[in-house]
C-alpha cells in the first residue's frame, strides 16, 4: 500500500500536446486544483430492488465523469508580448485547429487535448496526473469565475476554471515545469473603477465576473463513458459591490418601464501589480448588458462597510486591453 501526501500544485500544462513548449502553457500561479467524480444520476451505483427480497439483487451502474477545478492568482498570460492574451482565450487546444480555444465568448468551446497536473508531494518529488494526452473530445472547460476585491487584507485576486473530463486519469512521475519566455503570470492588484454611459465610479469594494456556460455531458445506455458534450447558450453574470452607493447605474435601472442596456460603455478597470502601474480594462458588449438585480442598500451606524450590490447580465464578446 502506498499513501500519498500532497504538498502543493507545482504546475498545470494545458494545450494540445507536449511536443514543444509552444504547444501548451505551463501554468505555475496555481492557488489550488481539485477533482471530484460526478454522476448525473446522483450516486455512482444504486441498489437494484427485487420484488419479495429483503436485500437488493445487485446494483445499477450509473454514468460518471470527472469534474476538475483550477484556481489561479489572477490568471496566466499565453504571450507576455501581448499580456492581455490570457491563456484560455488565446492558447490553441486542438491539434491542427488554429482557431481552437478553451473558452470562446460567442462560439462553442473547443476540446482540450492535453491536460496534465503536476503535484509536489511531501518528500519533494513530483506526481503527474494526466487527464488528456492528445485525446480528442474528452475534456472541455465549462466555467470561469473571476473575483477581485478592494477589501483590506485580500492576498489573492482569483480566476477559477471548471472542466469536464470523460475518461480515466493516468498517474506517473511528474516533471519540472518547462520554461517558456512567451508565458507569464498576470496579477491584478485592485479595482480602479467601473464605468457605464461615459461615467465612472471608484468606490468599488468588489467585482465578480461569472461566465455561465450551459454544457451537458452526453451519454448513451449501456455505456458508462460519456460520448460528448452538448453546448448551449452562454452569458456572464457580473456583480459589483459598492461602498456605499453611486448614481452611475441610475440610467440602467427602471421601475416603471423595461430595463435598458448600457448606452455607451460598460467596463471595469483594474490596476496590475507591476512597477509600471499598468491598467487593464475589461469592456463588455454594451448593447447586451443589462442590470438584472439590485440588492438591498444598507446604511448601518455600527458597520465599517455600508454596501450596495448590483448585478448585471451580459453576453457577447469581452474585450481585454492594457495601457
Image: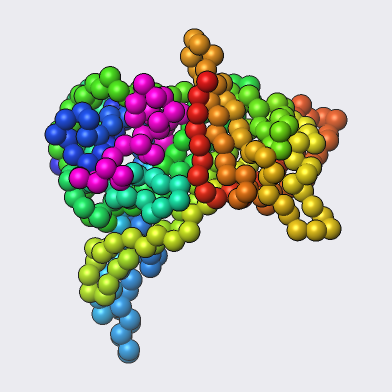
* x then y, percent, for residue 149: 60, 29
| Quarter of the image with the N terminus in it | top left
Q: Main secondary structure of the magenta part?
A: loop
Residue 50 part of the magenta-drawn span: no
- Residue shown at the point (41%, 24%) measured from the top left: 83
Q: Which residues are magenta?
A: 71-100
Residue 267 horizontal side relative to residue 217, left or right: right
Residue 4 horizontal side relative to residue 281, left or right: left
State whether residue 172 appears in this view.
yes
* x then y, percent, for residue 320: 49, 33
Tell me which colouring the rendered structure shows.
Answer: rainbow
- Residue shown at the point (60%, 32%) measured from the top left: 268
State whether residue 8 appears in this view.
no
- Considering every residue shown, the one lying at the far bottom of the view is 52
- Residue shown at the point (32%, 50%) measured from the top left: 110
* x then y, percent, for residue 105: 45, 47
* x then y, percent, for residue 260: 72, 52
Residue 26 falls in which quadrant of the image? top left
Residue 311 horizontal side relative to residue 81, left or right: right
Amino acid at each position: 500500500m502506498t499513501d500519498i501526501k500532497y504538498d502543493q500544485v507545482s504546475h498545470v500544462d494545458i494545450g494540445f500536446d507536449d511536443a514543444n513548449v509552444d504547444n501548451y502553457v505551463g501554468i505555475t500561479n496555481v492557488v489550488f486544483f481539485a477533482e471530484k467524480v460526478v454522476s448525473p444520476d446522483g450516486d455512482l451505483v444504486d441498489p437494484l430492488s427485487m420484488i419479495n427480497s429483503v436485500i437488493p439483487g445487485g446494483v445499477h451502474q450509473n454514468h460518471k465523469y470527472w469534474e476538475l477545478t483550477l484556481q489561479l492568482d489572477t490568471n496566466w498570460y499565453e504571450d507576455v508580448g501581448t499580456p492581455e492574451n490570457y491563456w484560455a482565450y488565446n492558447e490553441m487546444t486542438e491539434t491542427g485547429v488554429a482557431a481552437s480555444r478553451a473558452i470562446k465568448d460567442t462560439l462553442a468551446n473547443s476540446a482540450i487535448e492535453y491536460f496534465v497536473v503536476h503535484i509536489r508531494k511531501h518528500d519533494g518529488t513530483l506526481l503527474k496526473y494526466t487527464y488528456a494526452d492528445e485525446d480528442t473530445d474528452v475534456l472541455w472547460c465549462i466555467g470561469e469565475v473571476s473575483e477581485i476585491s478592494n477589501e483590506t487584507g485580500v492576498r489573492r485576486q482569483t480566476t477559477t476554471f471548471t472542466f469536464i473530463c470523460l475518461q480515466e486519469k493516468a498517474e506517473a512521475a511528474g516533471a519540472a515545469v518547462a520554461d517558456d519566455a512567451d508565458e507569464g503570470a498576470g496579477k491584478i492588484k485592485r479595482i480602479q473603477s467601473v464605468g457605464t454611459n461615459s461615467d465612472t465610479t471608484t468606490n468599488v469594494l468588489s467585482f465578480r465576473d461569472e461566465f455561465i456556460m450551459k454544457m451537458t455531458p452526453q451519454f448513451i445506455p449501456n455505456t458508462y463513458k460519456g460520448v460528448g458534450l452538448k453546448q448551449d447558450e452562454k452569458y456572464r453574470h457580473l456583480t459589483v459591490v459598492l461602498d456605499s452607493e453611486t448614481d452611475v447605474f441610475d440610467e440602467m435601472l427602471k421601475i416603471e418601464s423595461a430595463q435598458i442596456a448600457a448606452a455607451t460603455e460598460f467596463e471595469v478597470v483594474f490596476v496590475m501589480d507591476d512597477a509600471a502601474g499598468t491598467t487593464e480594462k475589461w469592456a463588455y458588449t454594451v448593447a447586451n448588458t443589462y442590470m438584472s438585480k439590485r440588492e438591498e442598500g444598507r446604511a448601518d451606524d455600527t458597520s465599517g462597510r455600508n454596501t450596495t450590490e448590483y448585478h448585471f447580465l451580459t453576453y457577447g464578446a469581452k474585450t481585454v486591453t492594457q495601457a
